[in-house]
Image: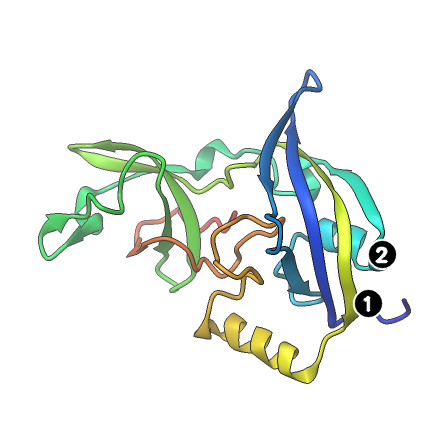
Amino acid sequence: MDNQQNKYISVSYQLHSIDADGSKHLEEQTQQGNPFQFISGFGVTLDAFEQQIVGLTPGEKFDFTLQPTEAFGEYDSEGVHKLNREMFSINGHFDHENIYEGAVITLMDADEKRFMARVTKVEEDGVTVDTNHPLAGSTLQFTGVVLENRDATNEEIQHMLNHLSGEGCGCGCDDCEGGCGHDHKDGCCGHEHHHHEGGCGHCHH
């Protein structure tokens, strides 16, 4: 394909992380009848993932590996921060429903930029969050098949633009839940809290 922008692509796939010893762990997979769909050129998927997929035709299978630098980056210990419990309070009460160990939440820095973080510890004197992507530092293997690859319609492009402008998830998935091989750049999932302390501006989604 000469023009690889604005392609409406649908894929079914499995994602495995690969340990240093070569062992694999299934991280996510699309469900039957619910493929991952995206439009190329909008940055809603990993660049390296899109580059591998965009030139394939419907029915074509794929099996490729991305190094950490091509995927979610190396793990950065400076992405771990302990924040005041007060910033997670609603009407004077700590938000136990959404803030618990293992929860993935949306934070916002002083520049109103949203980013995802994972709660790693909840203590009386603060909440520790990790802004690294859960797969940071991991080598990833994607295997699957392309179901559809065609020019996106004007309506589909406008729909994506609406999502990216904040009128929706913009993830390209039906339920805004699964990882789907992309990086949730919109920060649409999870509970949103403001963070005005320095150093948390990482955007590893």
Q: CA distance from mark 1 to mark 2?
A: 10 Å
The amino acid at mark 1 is Gln
Secondary structure at numbered mark 2? loop
Mark 2 surroundings within 10 Å by alpha-carbon count, few (fewer than 14), some (14 through 19), many (20 or more): some
Q: Which mark is residue 56?
A: 2
Residue at image coords 9%, 53%: 92
The amino acid at mark 2 is Leu
CB within 8 Å, label 1 to label 2: no
Q: Which mark is residue 141?
A: none
- Report which quarter residue 4 is drawn in: bottom right
Q: Say if 180 sits above or below 10 in the image.
A: above
Observer-side mark, 1 or 2, equals: 2
* Direction from residue 9 to residue 172 in the image, left or right: left
- Report which quarter residue 11 is drawn in: bottom right
* Numbered circles on residues, count: 2
Between residues 135 and 80, which one lies in front from this camera angle? 135
Q: Say if 66 sits above or below 153 in the image.
A: above
* Direction from residue 89 to residue 100 in the image, left or right: right
Between residues 184 and 204, which one lies in front from this camera angle? 184
Q: Position of residue 103 (x, y in %)?
A: 35, 41
Residue at image coords 79%, 59%: 54
Q: Position of residue 200 (x, y in %)?
A: 40, 47
Residue at image coords 65%, 39%: 15
Q: Position of residue 20 (x, y in %)?
A: 67, 19
Residue at image coords 48%, 58%: 175
Q: Say if 44 sits above or below 179 in the image.
A: below
Quarter holding the N terminus? Answer: bottom right
Instruction: Return the residue at label 1.
Output: 4
The residue at the far left in this view is 92
The residue at the far front in this view is 33
Between residues 31 and 50, which one lies in front from this camera angle? 31
